[in-house]
Image: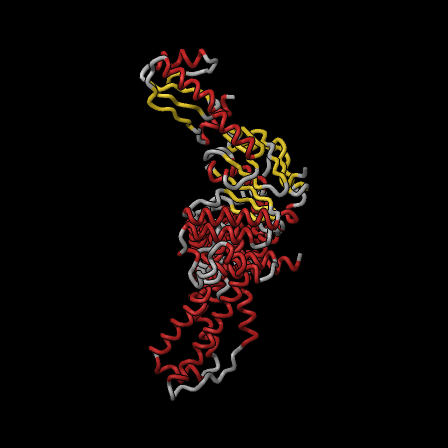
Amino acid sequence: MSYCVETHGLIHTFSKQTVLNNINLQVLEGSIYGFLGPNGAGKTTTLKLILGLLKKQQGSITVFGKSFGQNRQDILKKLGSLIESPSVYGHLTATENLRVLQKIYQCPKERINSVLKDVGLSDTGNKKAGQFSLGMKQRLSIAVALLNNPSLLILDEPTNGLDPNGIIEMRELLKKLNHEKGVTIIISSHLLPEIEKLATHAGIINNGIMMFQGTLPELIDKQQQASSIMLETNDPPKTIQIIIANDIHAHIENGKIMLPVISKLTLADINRQLVQHDIDVYEINTIKNDLESIFMNLINN
Amino acid sequence: MELSFIHSFQSEWLKKKRSAAAWLTIIGGFFIPAIILVNRFIDSSLLREQNTSNHLWEAIYNRCWQFMALFLLPMGVILASSLITQLEFKNNTWKQLHTTPQRLTIIFFAKLTVILVMMLQFFILFNIGIYLTGIIPAVFFRNVPYPLEAFPFVSLLKANSMFFLDSLPIIAIQYFISLQFKNFLVPVGTGLAMYTASMIGLSWKYGYILPYSYSALNLNFMKNKGAVNPSANIHLWSIGYFIVFSMLSYIFYINKKEKG
């Protein structure tokens, strides 16, 4: 397996505060790597270090198998990026913004119309980018990232400001780039559903520490583990006794009984036992935990 | 290296299209000649005599440069130099620029070159303005002939070159400050403070060490009138300041911890 991006022991501090602690990122070539974490977890700092926007303090970074420090230009030639908020020149049109970059990349001029079409901005004409909505600016930034036909795309929260339709279109575009052109994509987000629908691999970071790294099925498995079942009955203490008697750990939370995810058969069996013991069952519900809960679960583990 | 510098320069040049810096260059270039022209129209009775004189160009040139060198040129340079870097801060594009496959050295010098070429553009427009100030009255007044004296191209080129040289320290210092600070007020405020200090320093014997004073000191009447030691070679001081601050600026830029 060859890694497109690999970091070893990345440590970064801002005024004596450690914001990244021993980050070992491994992004497989041809994968879509969802980089998840709450705001302030260290996602942007990691991506900025990979792109050379921050001076590396400790650790190593290799991109396309080469050290970033020694091969900065070669690497950046094959890379497209969008970091945080949109980077566009407000006094220029969409085409002019891309012309500015086309001059540097020296890619064919036809690429400008092509990427504008890809992101749905081909009919903006003479409208200045400063008059664009946030979503349109974000699309233009993505067009900029795609201009040089990159082999690696690094996108930091690219769907910020996009409407639901825009998010779907963006997802389809990224999937297409990955499937048809084999572009490796690193996409950061704090929204798990967004990553679930797109990524093949995921990394979760919290407080500068890598909490999880693996394939998406492995992450979904973690999510499953972090999920729970909620039962509401007329007699919680007696319900707990019956559940524990079945060797299942359970506890009461706000008058409701919480137990880990169990098989459908076991759940049906427990329900039957409760009814047999004259307990009224009002509700049985599976609570799928959100990303934050998974973080908590991972941290607690 | 050379080719990538040209591409980088072209890219930087495109960026300033329709920007405040670009408008400042055009408006600033024609501003003083336009005022002098209006003044000539107001005193229209003198036009014939002026246009037949052998010193027409020298007279217009001196009047234009008097205002330009003392105030507008330093102010224009302060603003234009600061606005070029402000384009990146304002649009949040430093990170985009610094992830393009070009050496930081090239980015630094491409931007500096854009400022220098803009200055050159400004000087060209200013001199076109001077020329138009001389000939336009002849278009509107039948009794006013076109200037009899030929346009002294070579001597004006020489004189302009000196003013250009004398503006270099301001460019280098403003570029240095504006690369360091996101807030536009910092370079502009510092520039204004430096300019004021330099103007006050014109009455000081060692005023020639003040880097924002050279365009004023280059005016003939200032040289003779002021207290500044007239034997000091202000052009050499200009070049010295330009080299020192350009180098300083480059070192600070390259070693910046956060590049976007």
Q: Is residue B191 left or right of residue A99?
A: left
**Depicted A192 relative to depicted A184: above or below:** above
In the rendered image, residue A69, in percent from the top left (x then y), is placed at 65, 42
**Depicted A297 relative to depicted B232: above or below:** above
Q: Is residue A258 left or right of residue A49?
A: left
Please tell me which residue is depicted at 59% across the width and 43% down the height of the picture.
A52
Give the camera-side residue of B142 and A244: A244
In the rendered image, residue B139, in percent from the top left (x then y), is placed at 41, 84
Give the camera-side residue of B35 and A55: A55
Give the total number of marks visible in the rendering: 0
In the rendered image, residue A300, in percent from the top left (x then y), is placed at 49, 21
**Depicted B232 relative to depicted B98: above or below:** below
Please tell me which residue is depicted at 42% across the width and 17% down the height of the picture.
A270
Give the camera-side residue of B24 and A269: A269
Q: Is residue A14 left or right of residue A58?
A: left
User: How is the structure coloured here?
Assistant: secondary structure
Please tell me which residue is depicted at 57% across the width and 62% down the height of the picture.
A110
**Depicted B122 relative to depicted A239: above or below:** below
Q: Is residue B76 visible?
A: no
